[in-house]
Amino acid sequence: MTGDILDPSTLPDAVRGVSAIVHLAAVFRTSDTDLIWRSNLEGTRNLIAAAEAHAPDARFILASTTNVYDKNSTRPAREADSVAPEQAYPASKVGAEKLLRESGLNWSILRLPFVYGDGDGHLEMLPKHLHTFGFHPAHRVSTIHHRDIATAMRPALAGAFDGRILNLSDEAPTTVYELAGLVGETMEPSAEAMQNPWYLHVDASLARSLGFQPTVRTVYQAAQEGIL
């Protein structure tokens, strides 16, 4: 069965009798903030309500974002750190997380960093983001390949992540200068002091301790294997 998270009438048949719900639906590559809030918050509200009514024993796994953390962090962000989203996308995800945590469902929340791979175009869009947000070329961000979202679902579906919020990432936060270079773009180099050096850099050791091991360990491995 199929359903539309923005149309609650379609969801009962879509979730009835399932043992797990993996909620990856999200809107973020747009300036339409109304659509972001409707999809990420209200859509999640609709799906939670359907699960509570028609699949109350299902394991509910929500994909969120590491962009929720305070950009002024003094180290890689950990799951217990405070959240301070500044854009609609992470703010809507914080709202969705709260709805799920306050539900009666068996939940887990996976906070994803910069996601790329298999030609999704996210890396190619990076230069635009760099210009918009003024990133220093030496700024390192945590990343994860699309394929390792599926990798993370194995322990999540087995129950290892139940009742937890977890950061996910590969094994090597990479500078935005290097990321841009991988798609043939260049950034103006700089030796100036960098502001907010830990922004978008997360500590994913908790997920690793619970069974998550990325199969695409770095963006350079992805480049070598032709799966950027």
Image (cartoon, rainbow, N blue to C red):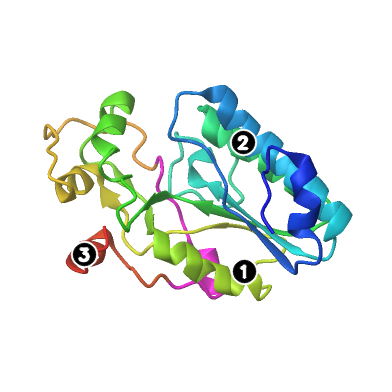
Residue range (magenta): 199-213
Quadrant position of residue 155: bottom right
The residue where tag 3 is placed is 226
Q: Is residue 157 magenta?
A: no
Q: Residue at x 41, y 59 (%)?
A: 146
The residue where tag 2 is placed is 39
Residue 88 horizontal/vertical position (percent): 54, 28
The residue where tag 1 is placed is 156
Q: Which mark is residue 106?
A: none
Label 3 vs 2, first from the N-terminus: 2
Label 1 vs 2, first from the N-terminus: 2
Discs 3/1, front: 3
Quadrant position of residue 228: bottom left
| Farthest residue, direction right | 53
Relative depth, front residue between 35 and 83:
35
Q: Residue at x 12, y 38 (%)?
A: 186
Callout 3 amino acid: Gly
Query: CA gap, disc 1 to disc 2?
Result: 23 Å
